[in-house]
């Protein structure tokens, strides 16, 4: 284990005024004029010092009561893009704590993650993951085109009617991932890296600040135990809205990444004589996939992954979103459709959803700033796919797209004349 992971001074770095101030700056980004942010900033130094005191723990001389940090309650709301999700927003002072915590522990865990994990990491992201998958598909196609004999089980690994090798994809998704993360397992994984007891106490408070379900332990050994009640109850679920939840989610599924990279191939070799390995694996949060030349191997991978998730992480695959298919039909991944030799396309459902949203904005007279931000967000997404003809078509068909394409000032003027402000 690295010296940094054994560092017993992590808590001092965490509660330092410099770290808390840095966390405040990150937490207020793009939210400077919200009421809770302005109230916290109005007495910034006092609030940060008071938060620091609570995190360290102190005894109030007036009331003679020991005071320590307690996580506040969450504001809940629903979003639909495209499916309904419950978002839990923590109070601003707690979001400062989340950022302060992330500043300290994220670098420790990130260096242990595999390269091909792309969600919520610096230098990674959606577009890097899509480009990486495209390179994977091109690489495996090129290798097999040069040497079809490289696969031991040539009959099952190869081929189409044209004699070209066929590559298969196993795509998986975890059912209700954030709501299913087991608190006890998550905290156990964090304890493997973080040894500072004071920092662990704060992490535990953040994890326990919210849960979605309480599952009853069905293990025979525990049911036979005299200790019942709380021993049998396991809380699951972390809030989608927390910054720390993104890191915790990556820590949790890093166990799957390590299993795939270091154990899965060896296990399959023992049971399959003519083993033709899956060639590539990539994950973006709970959406992950494998590429292989052998459909039979991918079926075995699916069953082994299912067992590992259920037994080790108490997670379930979403049966509606687990598929094995040839990549020649394209791989639907992160809002794009990726092909081997053709340009990346935009997912049709995403395009239709955006058009529907813009029409809704027009009907409800949304503020020009809201419409412009939505358009900019979509344009940023669209530029990474083969979308030039699509955008030209939208401009011809819908006046609002034509005006938005001419710039924000033109759109603001258009919105005023058409009563969209």
Image: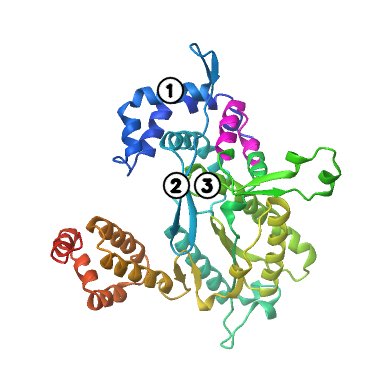
Numbered disc 1: secondary structure: helix
Q: Is 70 displayed left or right of 256 in the figure?
A: left
Q: Mark 3 packing: few (<14 Cα in 10 Å), some, or many (20+)?
A: many
- The foreground one among 156 and 6 is 6
Q: Position of residue 105 (x, y in %)?
A: 53, 36
Q: Earlier in the sequence, mark 1 or mark 2?
A: 1
Name the image quarter holding the C terminus: bottom left
Do the CB atoms of the residues marked 1 and 2 lie less than 8 Å apart?
Answer: no
Residue 327 sits above or below residue 93 on the image: below
Snapshot colouring: rainbow
Q: Main secondary structure of the magenta part?
A: helix
Numbered disc 3: secondary structure: loop
Numbered disc total: 3
Q: Is 307 displayed left or right of 103 in the figure?
A: right
Q: Quadrant of residue 33?
A: top left
In the rendered image, residue 197 lying in the magenta stretch gets the answer yes
Q: Which residue is mark 1?
A: 50
**Residue lying farthest bottom?**
161
Highlighted range, magenta: 189-207
Q: Quadrant of residue 377?
A: bottom left
Do the CB atoms of the residues marked 2 and 3 lie less than 8 Å apart?
Answer: no
Residue 122, numbered label: 2
Q: Earlier in the sequence, mark 1 or mark 3?
A: 1
Residue 239, numbered label: 3
Q: Mark 1 packing: few (<14 Cα in 10 Å), some, or many (20+)?
A: few
Can residue 11 be seen here? The reply is: yes
């Amino acid at each position: 284990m690295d010296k940094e992971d054994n560092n017993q001074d992590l808590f001092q770095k965490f509660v330092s005024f410099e770290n808390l101030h840095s966390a405040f700056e990150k937490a207020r980004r793009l939210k400077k004029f919200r009421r809770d942010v302005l109230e916290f900033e109005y007495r910034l130094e006092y609030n940060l010092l008071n938060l620091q005191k609570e995190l360290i723990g102190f005894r109030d001389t007036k009331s003679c009561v020991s005071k320590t940090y307690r996580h506040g309650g969450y504001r809940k709301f629903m979003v639909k893009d495209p499916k309904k999700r419950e978002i839990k927003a923590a109070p601003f002072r707690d979001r400062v704590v989340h950022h302060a915590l992330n500043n300290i522990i994220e670098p420790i865990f990130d260096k242990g993650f595999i390269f091909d994990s792309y969600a919520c990491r610096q230098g990674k992201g959606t577009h890097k993951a899509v480009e990486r998958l495209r390179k994977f598909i091109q690489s495996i196609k090129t290798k097999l085109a040069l040497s079809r004999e490289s696969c031991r089980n040539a009959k099952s690994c190869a081929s189409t009617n044209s004699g070209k090798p066929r590559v298969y994809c196993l795509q998986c998704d975890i059912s209700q991932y954030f709501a299913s993360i087991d608190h006890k397992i998550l905290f156990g994984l964090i304890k493997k890296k973080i040894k500072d007891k004071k920092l662990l106490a704060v992490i535990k408070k953040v994890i326990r600040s919210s849960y979605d379900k309480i599952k009853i332990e069905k293990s025979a050994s525990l049911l036979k135990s005299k200790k019942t009640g709380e021993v049998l109850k396991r809380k699951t679920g972390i809030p989608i809205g927390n910054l720390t939840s993104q890191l915790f989610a990556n820590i949790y599924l890093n166990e799957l990444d390590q299993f795939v990279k270091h154990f899965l191939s060896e296990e399959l070799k023992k049971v399959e004589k003519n083993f033709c390995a899956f060639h590539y694996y990539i994950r973006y949060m709970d959406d992950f996939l494998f590429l292989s030349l052998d459909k039979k191997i991918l079926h075995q991978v699916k069953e082994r992954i299912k067992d590992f998730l259920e037994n080790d992480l108490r997670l379930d695959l979403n049966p509606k979103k687990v598929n094995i298919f040839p990549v020649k039909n394209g791989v639907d991944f992160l809002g794009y459709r990726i092909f081997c030799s053709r340009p990346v396309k935009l997912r049709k459902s995403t395009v239709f959803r955006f058009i529907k949203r813009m029409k809704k904005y027009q009907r409800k007279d949304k503020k020009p700033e809201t419409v412009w931000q939505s358009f900019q967000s979509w344009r940023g997404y669209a530029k990474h796919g083969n979308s030039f003809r699509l955008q030209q078509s939208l401009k011809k068909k819908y006046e609002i797209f034509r005006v938005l394409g001419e710039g924000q000032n033109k759109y603001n003027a258009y919105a005023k004349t058409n009563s969209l402000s």
